[in-house]
Amino acid sequence: MTLSELAETLDVPPRQIRFLVAEGILPPANKTGRAADAYDNEHLSRARRYLGLHRLGMKPGSIKVLMAFDDAVPVLQEGGVELRVAQDVSPQSLDIDDVLEKVKTALEAYVGKETQE
């Protein structure tokens, strides 16, 4: 579908689609010819997800972070907390102690405890 068709389907102006592409929330359009662009079901579903989260009151930056982990690899689910690793992160590049400390700090802040040093 064209930019206009996608915008019409989503009931948003075309500039909103351009914004989502520029922000990296939607992938660039597929090229079909010299100047023609095509949007597919991936664009449609990701845009619908973004717009739904935006309507719930989430800020664009928060939605972008949330959507960036769509393709992350789930590593652990425990006590309602999920640890996911982005696919482009090499396991060898992770500083596990640093990551664990940051997770601990974030969870303590979430439950309202002071970080104990």
Image (cartoon, rainbow, N blue to C red):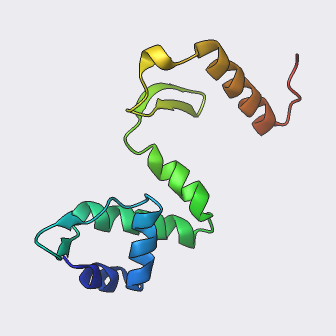
Instruction: Provide residue 8's location: percent of width, then percent of height.
Output: 31, 86
Q: Quadrant of residue 97?
A: top right
Q: How many marks?
A: 0
The residue at the far front in this view is: 34
Q: Which residue corresponds to the image point at 40% horizontal and 45% vertical from the top-left?
A: 70
Image position of 5 (left or right of 65): left
Quarter of the figure with the N terminus: bottom left
Quarter of the figure with the C terminus: top right
| Residue 91 drawn above or below residue 26 | above
Instruction: Provide residue 100's location: percent of width, then percent of height.
Output: 65, 19
| Residue 19 drawn above or below residue 88 | below
Q: Quadrant of residue 114?
A: top right
The residue closer to the viewer here, 52 or 94, is: 94
Image position of 98 (left or right of 74): right
| Residue 86 drawn above or below residue 38 | above
Q: Which residue corresponds to the image point at 60% horizontal and 28% vertical from the top-left?
A: 79
Q: Which residue corresponds to the image point at 66% horizontal and 18% vertical from the top-left?
A: 98
Q: Which residue corresponds to the image point at 12% horizontal and 69% vertical from the top-left?
A: 32
Image position of 108 (left or right of 45): right
Instruction: Provide residue 102's location: percent of width, then percent of height.
Output: 70, 26
Image position of 24 (left or right of 3): right
Instruction: Provide residue 27's location: percent of width, then percent of height.
Output: 33, 59
